[in-house]
Image: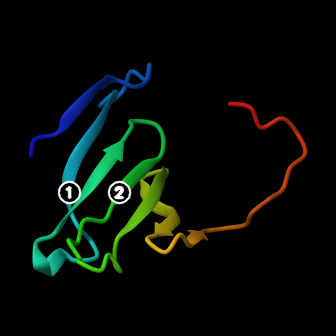
Amino acid sequence: MPDVDLGVASDWDEGDTHGRISLRPSPKFSDAGKQDVVISSPLGIELSVNTNHSTSQEGDRIVFTTYQGTEKKVIAILDSGGDLYIAGRVIQEQGDLSY
């Protein structure tokens, strides 16, 4: 499957400015040739949907990643049981969280 180009996703003038949906080799199942569906943007979060084709869906999960400098970091994992694993701390703020 070729990348699906979602068009310009940022006004950033360096590198790729387009959002994309693509297939990428799965880091979890790399020896089995499985692939993950990846939804990415040039300056934001990346969602990787694990597509291990399990009939029981035990291994299916969504991995949220972002970059800190040039290093890719996992910031959260949502598994098929509904469990959410978050790297770091959960901070409860009373301030304005509008986007």
Q: Circle 2: is it few (<14), some (14-19), or many (20+) Cα within 10 Å?
A: many
Give the number of the disc on residue 48: 2
Viewer-side residue, 10 vs 56 = 56
Taking the spot 27% from the left edge, 71% from the top edge, the residue there is 27
Amino acid tagged 2: Ser
**Disc 2, SS:** strand
Q: Circle 1: is it few (<14), some (14-19), or many (20+) Cα within 10 Å?
A: some
Residues under numbered marks 2 and 1 in contact, where contact means CB atoms less than 8 Å apart = yes
Taking the spot 21% from the left edge, 46% from the top edge, the residue there is 22
Q: Quadrant of residue 58?
A: bottom left
Report which residue position mark 1 lands on: 24
Q: Quadrant of residue 65?
A: bottom left
Residue 12 lies, in percent from the top left, at 43, 23
Q: How many marks?
A: 2
Taking the spot 68% from the left edge, 30% from the top edge, the residue there is 99
Residue 11 lies, in percent from the top left, at 44, 19
**Which residue extends farthest right?**
94
Residue 57 lies, in percent from the top left, at 32, 75
Viewer-side residue, 90 vs 62 = 62
Residue 4 lies, in percent from the top left, at 20, 35
Amino acid tagged 1: Arg
Does 61 sit above or below residue 6?
below
